[in-house]
Amino acid sequence: MRNKKKKIFIAIDTNNISKAKKIIKETRTSKIKIGYKFGLEFILSKYGRNFISKLKNKIIFIDIKAKDIPNTMMSAINSLKDLKINYLTVHISSGLEALKAVKKASSKIKIVGVSTLTSLDNHNLKEIGYNKSVKNLIIHQSKLARKAKLDALVCSPKEVGYVRKVFKKEIITPGVRFDKNIQDQKRTMHPSKIKSDWLVCGRAITKGNIKNNLKKLIHYLN
């Protein structure tokens, strides 16, 4: 990930408005392109939606990982359009019909297909009932995302190489770790080795000294 590809989504993994404001304030920089990712915890909180609606001149990534029947997913997308979202996640496992319906309803929102969660490995997939490996399942999901004409795809850093051969649009990767502490994600990588278009950084940036953590990340990317 070099030069013009230095783009980072900072994950606002909290429902505390004061903490969210602090994260946004302390990650201001002109050295890399920054966007902000808000998940279900924030969206469903008492003041979360209102906070997002008032953000200006920010790249907004809403990570709800929608997965439902086509009509319900379309309705969910339409209910969020007032927030001026740039990116919105849906599970690729929702199926081709649902993905196409969401893409058709998305207007200017970039629809991001979520492949296999970074918290899962081959053992977990077998537990769920899949007979494919992580690699083969994600290749299959990438082809489905391409067929549905989605705008971006989420996968772990370890899958970027073979996803790129199938899916030619934006690739977004969580699972960024500065050290060997993988926490609740199983397929992780050091930021200096990641080749995606966007990194998603949560605790690696927001836990501890935010400004120093961001400086460390920028150093690793240069």
Image (cartoon, grey):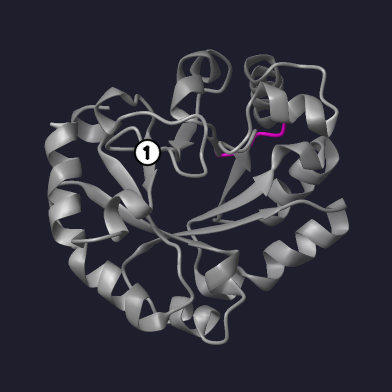
Q: From this view, report whether residue 81 is shown above or below residue 123.
A: below
Answer above or below: position of 128 versus 104. Answer: above
Give percent across and percent down for residue 52: 46, 76
Residue 30 visible in rendering:
yes
Q: Quadrant of residue 151?
A: top right
> Is residue 110 rendered to the left or right of residue 75?
left
Q: Main secondary structure of the magenta part?
A: loop
Relative to 168, residue 18 above or below: below
Q: Is residue 51 above or below residue 28?
A: below
Q: Mark 1, residues whose alpha carbon is within 10 Å: few (<14), some, or many (≥20)?
A: few
Along the horizontal axis of the image, is 52 left or right of 100? Answer: left
| Left or right of 149 in this view: 109 | left
Question: Residue 69 at what x, y percent from top left?
Answer: 87, 52
The image position of residue 61, as x and y in percent, is 47, 57
Residue 197 occupies which quadrant of the picture? top left
Image quarter of the C terminus: top left
Closer-to-camera residue (198/211): 211
- The residue drawn where x is 78% and y is 48% is 101
Residue 144 in view, yes or no: no
In this rendering, the count of numbered labels is 1
Residue for point 52% across, 86% down:
47
* Residue at left offset 34%, top offset 76%: 19
Q: Residue at x 45, y 63 (%)?
A: 13
Mark 1, residue position: 181
* Element type at mark 1: loop
Query: Does the stretch in magenta take in 46?
Result: no
Where is residue 173 shown, x and y percent of the image?
Answer: 45, 36
Q: Quadrant of the N terminus?
A: top left
Q: Amino acid at mark 1?
A: Asn
Give the residues in magenta.
147-151
